[in-house]
Image (spheres, helix red, strand yellow):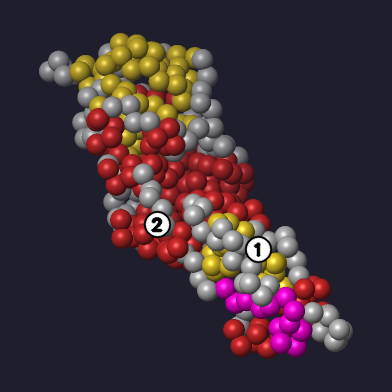
Amino acid sequence: MIEFKEVSKVYEDNFEVLKNINLRVNKGELLVLIGPSGCGKTTTMKMINRLIDPTKGEIFINGNSIKHRNPVELRRNIGYVIQQIGLFPHMTIQDNVALVPKLKKQDPKKYLKRVDELLEMVGLDPEIYKNRYPTELSGGQQQRIGVIRALAADPPIILMDEPFSALDPISREQLQDELLNLHNKLDKTIVFVTHDMDEALKIADRICIIREGEIVQLNTAEEILRHPANDFVKNFIGEKRLKSYNGFDFPPIDEFISKAITIREDKGLAEAINQLRQNRVDSLIVVNKSNQYKGVASSWDIYRNYNDEKLKIKDIVRTDYACIKENDSVEKALIMIKESNKGYVLVLDDNKKVKGVITNGSLVKLLANKVINDS
């Protein structure tokens, strides 16, 4: 879709901001350019719509060089979103969003309908917002307008230059989510510049890390987190992020074990109902006289068979519940809970005696506390 071949940029003072960049952005991809201030990430992005021309090398879109394309015509077919938003204060929201389709002499009925659709797509009621002026909107709402204005003419490529960096954390996270939703729905090719690694990790299909005008690493977030190319990348990502993704130490399994409510297999169903009510549980762990695990009696099976006074717990016990040993790993417990769809696993010792249960809730709570404490 977009390809850089041996692209360099040297300014008049002989400062080389880009050094023989080779880069390919795939169709429908959200590629994030990231690096320290002055590394060349914004210069790289601005070359795509010829706001900056390379000193040497060529840039291609769909296999065609943009070198001889009319810059104005090129830009009208590439969406562009900047941090400062750049809405015209004397124009309504509808007129701001419809500006490029109007300049391209598209059918007014079609592009005004699209304005309404785009406003709805980012959670702004067109009947309320399209006739307002930019000063009547919050910062987050204005930035939403900036994003959909770039989409109004339905361009295949969108460039975004740190569009959310001036917003408060809540608005920023909301707009990141909006961007991901829009990208999934519209399948645009997006080149996104940021200095925030958390933002890059959240939104990118691939991340291109640039240092002093050179690409240091280009890959998915998963690969970069697992296999940073060098010490610069490790430092740029940050020790905490690397640790949280690659070095998470699970607490010992006994920290997750909750008390199991047990019942002997020779007990009747009336006693079982009493146990359920007293302990406010929806199932009972069935054991023999030696406290060895025999299965589980669910509240449904107990109540369903209650009128048959001859039945004992052993007659309705089920044995298809997940069990682990007390020396198994927490990771195994997580997997078994997910696969069993029961919400918990039973913990047994080497003699099949019940040590307790591990619930999905206890795992989430303790793991969440660990993440917070490690942060």
Residue 367, x across and y down, in percent: 42, 59
Q: Which mark is residue 243?
A: none
The C terminus is located in which quarter? bottom left
User: Total label count?
Assistant: 2
Residues shaded magenta: 260-272
User: Is residue 281 shown above or below 245?
Assistant: below
Q: Quadrant of residue 243?
A: top left
Q: Which residue is mark 2?
A: 251
Identified by mark 2, the residue type is Pro
What residue is rendered at 59% in x and 66% in y? 353
Q: Nearer the viewer, residue 341 or 119?
A: 341
SS for tag 1? loop
Above or below for 66 versus 244 = above
Residue 308 image point, x, y percent: 87, 84
Q: Is residue 15 visible?
A: yes
**Residue that numbered label 1 is attached to:** 342
Q: Nearer the viewer, residue 276 or 11?
A: 276
Indicate the position of residue 197 as horizontal and vertical percent values. Answer: 33, 42
> In the depicted view, which residue is nearer to us: 6 or 295?
295
Q: Nearer the viewer, residue 4 or 232?
A: 232
Does 259 appear in magenta? no
